[in-house]
Every structure is written in C-alpha cells, then in structure tokens.
C-alpha cells in the first residue's frame, strides 16, 4: 500500500511539472511558440517581448533600457536577415524539466547565405523574468555548433544585447 501511495505521489508530481512547463501565458512552451511565430512572421519587435535580454551576465542587473535593448536586438536580427541569414520556420517544440528548470528543443529551418538548412533539436534556454513572472527565451544552441562557437543566427537571436 505504501508503494502505491509513493507511486501516485510521483505521478502527480510529474503531471504538475508538465502542466507548469506547458500551460499558461508565462509558460516556457507559450513563450517559445510566440517567439518563433513572431520570428517567422518577421515581427521582430514583437518577438523581442519573449526574449530575456541582458547586457552583462544573465543574472546581473541590466544597465540599458528596454527600448535600447529592443533596438539593439531588432537591428541585429534585421541586419542578419538582410545578409541572407535568418530563421525561416520552426516545428516540434518540446519542453522538458532539467533539474527543475525548463529546457526546450525545437527543429528550425534556417536560411544561411541564401540556402535553407534544417537544424534538429536546437536547445532553447529559458530564464525566468521575475518582474513579469514569465519564462523567456535566453539562448538558442544547435548541437551542430562547435563548443564555444555559435552560428551567426544563434548569436543574433540570443538575449545578450551588450554588443
């Protein structure tokens, strides 16, 4: 009987974690879906609403305004697109718990130098924006990138705006 109670408790905990990660306006899944949808549509200023921006380490206070950060991020993404490098589409967002924190994975179709390439299982790092009580996209990382190096599109779409 004790084993059944523990099994039920574990199952209930897993269900609650799944609901937390996948439901609600501030959930990681919702933020990722809205972020990539706005990117697909070319609405970069709106996509920025789902980016956790920072100009130092991600856990340090930001020293620039929201408007400055948005302008830096949007101009970087627009310049990259003008050069023929951009995220064209996405599919298959998965959100998992990694030590209690959400970790996302997505398949992206990226145009690089005018040619389409599919990246599977691109990792989405999320950061919880405490002031707005929502999860936001902090970084994208392709498993095909070399350690310590990022593709131009990975650098452009990340939340770091201190450049």
Image (cartoon, grey):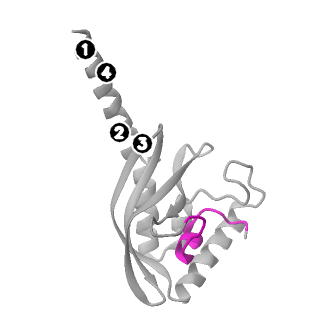
Q: Earlier in the sequence, mark 3 or mark 4?
A: 4
Q: Residues within 10 Å of mark 4 (few under 14, many from 20)?
A: few
Mark 1 falls on what kind of element? helix
Q: Residues within 10 Å of mark 3 (few under 14, many from 20)?
A: few
Q: Are marks 3 and 2 in contact (CB under 8 Å)?
A: no
Q: Gap in Å between the C-alphas at discs 3 and 4?
A: 17 Å
Q: Earlier in the sequence, mark 3 or mark 1?
A: 1
The mark total stands at 4
Rendered location of residue 110, percent (x, y): 42, 78
Residue 88's label in the rendered image is none
Stretch in magenta = 147-162
Q: Residues within 10 Å of mark 2 (few under 14, many from 20)?
A: few
Outermost residue, right side: 63
Mark 2 falls on what kind of element? helix
Identity of the residue drawn at 40% across and 67% down: 37
Q: Earlier in the sequence, mark 4 or mark 1?
A: 1
Residue named by callout 2: 19
| Res 89 → quadrant | bottom left
Rendered location of residue 30, percent (x, y): 41, 53
Q: Nearer the viewer, residue 137 or 34?
A: 137
Q: Is residue 132 above or below residue 159?
A: above
- Is residue 161 within the magenta segment? yes
- Is residue 64 within the magenta segment? no
Residue 97's label in the rendered image is 3
Identity of the residue drawn at 52% across and 51% down: 126
Residue named by callout 1: 3
Q: Gap in Å between the C-alphas at discs 4 and 1?
A: 10 Å
Q: Earlier in the sequence, mark 3 or mark 2?
A: 2
Residue named by callout 4: 9
């Amino acid at each position: 009987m004790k084993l059944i109670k523990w099994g039920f408790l574990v199952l209930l905990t897993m269900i609650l974690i799944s609901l937390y990660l996948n439901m609600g306006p501030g959930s990681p899944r919702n933020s990722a879906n809205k972020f990539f949808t706005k990117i697909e549509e070319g609405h970069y200023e709106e996509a920025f609403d789902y980016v956790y921006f920072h100009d130092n380490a991600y856990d340090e206070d930001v020293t620039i305004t929201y408007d400055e950060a948005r302008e830096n991020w949007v101009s970087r993404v627009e310049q990259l697109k003008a050069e023929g490098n951009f995220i064209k589409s996405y599919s298959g967002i998965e959100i998992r718990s990694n030590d209690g924190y959400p970790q996302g994975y997505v398949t992206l179709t990226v145009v690089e130098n005018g040619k389409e390439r599919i990246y599977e299982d691109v990792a989405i790092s999320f950061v919880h924006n405490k002031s707005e009580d929502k999860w936001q996209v902090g970084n994208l990382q392709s498993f095909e990138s070399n350690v310590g190096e990022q593709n131009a599109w990975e650098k452009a779409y990340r939340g770091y705006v201190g450049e």
